[in-house]
Image: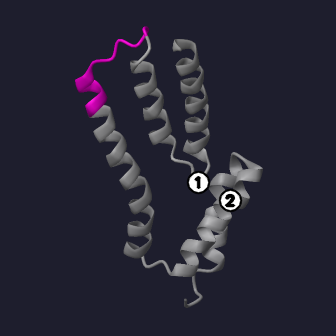
Amino acid sequence: MDFLLVTIAGLLVLTGIIGCIAPGIPGPSLSCGEIFLLHFTRWGGISTSLLIWLGVFTVVVTVVDYLLPVWTTRKFGGSKRGVWGSIIGLIVGLFFAPIGIIIGPFSWSFYWRNDSA
C-alpha cells in the first residue's frame, strides 16, 4: 500500500510542477496533496501541526493566485478584453516556452488594451 501512495504522490508532484506553469491546474494544491499522502506512509515523518500549517498556506496561496491578477488588472485600469487578451497570450505563449510565456500575455493585452468592453 505504501508503494501505491508513493506512486500517486509522485504523479501529484509532477502534475503540481506542470500546474506552476500551466494556467488552470492548481499546482500548490496538488503538491500539498502529495505531502498529505506521504504522511500516511511508513516513511512519512511529518507532524500533524506542520500538515495543518501547510494546508493553511496552500489555501492562502491558492486564493491569492486566483484573485491577485484580477485585482491588479482592475487597479491599473485594464479592461475585460485586456484580461482575456493576457490569458490568450499566456496560453499561446506556452507553445513557445519559456520566452513565449513572458512575451505572450503582454503582447495580447496591449493589442486589446484600448478597446472598450
Residue 32: image quadrant is top left
Q: Quadrant of residue 41?
A: top left
What residue is shown with label 1?
Answer: 23
Q: State the image coordinates of residue 86 (x, y, percent, origin top left).
A: 60, 67
State the colouring used for the structure image. one colour
Q: Which residues are magenta?
A: 42-52
113 lies above or below 105 = below
Q: Secondary structure at mark 2?
A: helix
Q: Is residue 20 above or below residue 112?
A: above
**In the rendered structure, which amino acid carries the disc numbered 2?**
Ile
Identify the image quadrant of residue 17.
top right
**Residue at the limit of the structure toward the front, as seen here:** 1
Where is residue 58 shown, x and y percent of the image?
Answer: 36, 41
Quadrant location of the C terminus in the rendered image? bottom right
- Residue 83 place in picture, x, y as percent: 54, 72
Q: Are marks 1 and 2 in contact (CB under 8 Å)?
A: yes
**Residue at (58, 86) in percent of width and height:** 114
Q: Which residue is mark 2?
A: 91
Residue 95 disc label: none
Q: Earlier in the sequence, mark 1 or mark 2?
A: 1
Question: What is the crowding at mark 1: few (fewer than 14 residues within 10 Å), some, or many (at least 20)?
Answer: few
Please determine whether, in this image, residue 35 is positioned above or below residue 24.
above
Alpha-carbon distance for marks 1 and 2? 8 Å
Seen as rendered, the residue at the extreme right is 95
In this image, 39 relative to 4: left or right? left
Instruction: Give the residue displayed 55% in from the left and 30% down from the top.
Output: 13
Q: Position of residue 9 (x, y in %)?
A: 54, 25
- Residue at horizontal 43 percent and vertical 68 percent from the top: 70
Q: Residue at x 26, y 33 (%)?
A: 53
